[in-house]
Amino acid sequence: MKLNILFLVRKTKLNKKGVCPIRCRITYNKKRSQFSTGLFINPKHWNNKQQYVEPPEPDAELKNTQLSLIKTKLSQAFLMLQVKEETFPVEDIYLLYKGEKTQKEQGVLEAFKRYLESLKKLIDIDIQRGTWVKFDYTHKHVKAFIKHKYNRNDYPLSKLNLQFLADFEYYLKTEKNLGQATINKMIQRFRKPIRIAVAEGHLDRDPFMLYKAKRTRNSIVFLSPEELQKHEKHEFSQPRLKFVKDLFVFCCYTGLPYRELMDLKPIHIVKGFDGNRWIEIKRQKTSKALSIPLLPKAEAILDKYLIDEKYVFPRISNQKYNSYLKEIGVIVGFDKKLTTHMARRTFASTVLLYNDVPMEIVSELLGHSSIKITQDSYAKVMKKRISLEINRLKGSG
């Protein structure tokens, strides 16, 4: 964007001496700012087209030199602001020309960065580190998008509109090959610091107020009763695969997420009110207490590993766990990709819902923050269960 510098003679401000002031108008990014040059001339001696003071104006040459100097200093100030590659309003050009502190317009990434810094202080107080990492991941994508789309290091908050969000979504799909569900989550996180910018007065209103996330079709992939049985019966010769198989089966009968599986300690295994053993542990993601009764198959695996150690199971990274599960899937002959989360879905679907356990109990055992999350995710599973029961009735009729 160019800087336009124009000198104007205010004939309406003619004083008793017959002279009027010369003002300077600077225009940048479709915004204007005016200030007085401190120079006065007879308006008859001003060549507006050439932007030049003409004789017989007293000290015409000196006044032209001063105007030229003002123009040069303004151009230098503009160049200095451009070199910083930051967004700035037209007023900053004048302030820098005067040698005063600029009122830098706040940018999108600057606002996001401030939010990340405040969020970081809440780790292990109100949020888990994983939550902060997800917001930081979103910040990196927004930064890459601004560089890709606008070739700049930041973008003015005041310029945000729905089109910015549409372009960002398109970028994530085409350049980053992300799925719609992931994109929806990323946009949801991106909107958080923008709402805070509105609350702090950096924006008059939420530019994304009318945004509606595109709906996604949730496909819950889990092992059927037959597949789960096939997995349980398969014998592996390699110790690492035996171990990962045990972890997976244990999760299929407890619904524990990876983080809680690795954090499981002997103190989390308690004797319940019914005389049976239960897992009592707090879920990190939702800070909700999990109370899970141990089914016989989970109890058998627990007894295999439960020794006087800090943790029930040996440590394994999520990456390695998933990598070994992928290997197991190929060996057993599944056409589904085994993941740590699939065990949790198998627990909800095959172990609980397929055995007529009510949705509210499933939600409680999974540690969901609300039953709506469970209903949204597993409604199709329930329909499939109903369909199977109806077909069974038809067959026996």
Image (tube, rainbow, N blue to C red):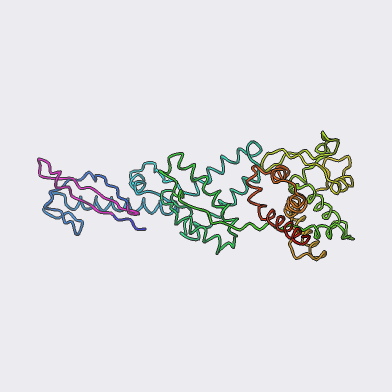
In the picture, measured across the screen, residue 167 lies left or right of residue 335, that is left
Name the image quarter holding the C terminus: bottom right
Check the image and report above or below for 37 versus 47: above
- Give 194 or 112, whichever is nearer the viewer: 194
In the picture, measured across the screen, residue 272 lies left or right of residue 118, that is right
Check the image and report above or below for 192 versus 165: above
Q: Position of residue 288 (x, y in %)?
A: 69, 39
Q: Position of residue 323 (x, y in %)?
A: 76, 59
- Give 53 or 161, whichever is nearer the viewer: 161
Number of marks:
0
Does the magenta run of residues contain 8? Answer: yes
Name which residue lies at 37% across and 58% down: 1
- Give 174 or 226, whichever is nearer the viewer: 226
Q: Quadrant of residue 299?
A: top right
Q: Residue furthest top?
A: 273
Q: Quadrant of residue 311?
A: top right
- The magenta region covers 5-30
Q: Residue furthest front?
A: 397
Q: Position of residue 52 (x, y in %)?
A: 19, 56
Q: Position of residue 280 (x, y in %)?
A: 77, 38
Name which residue lies at 33% across and 44% down: 98
Check the image and report above or below for 326 versus 161: below
Does the magenta run of residues contain 262? Answer: no
In the picture, measured across the screen, residue 166 lies left or right of residue 337, that is left
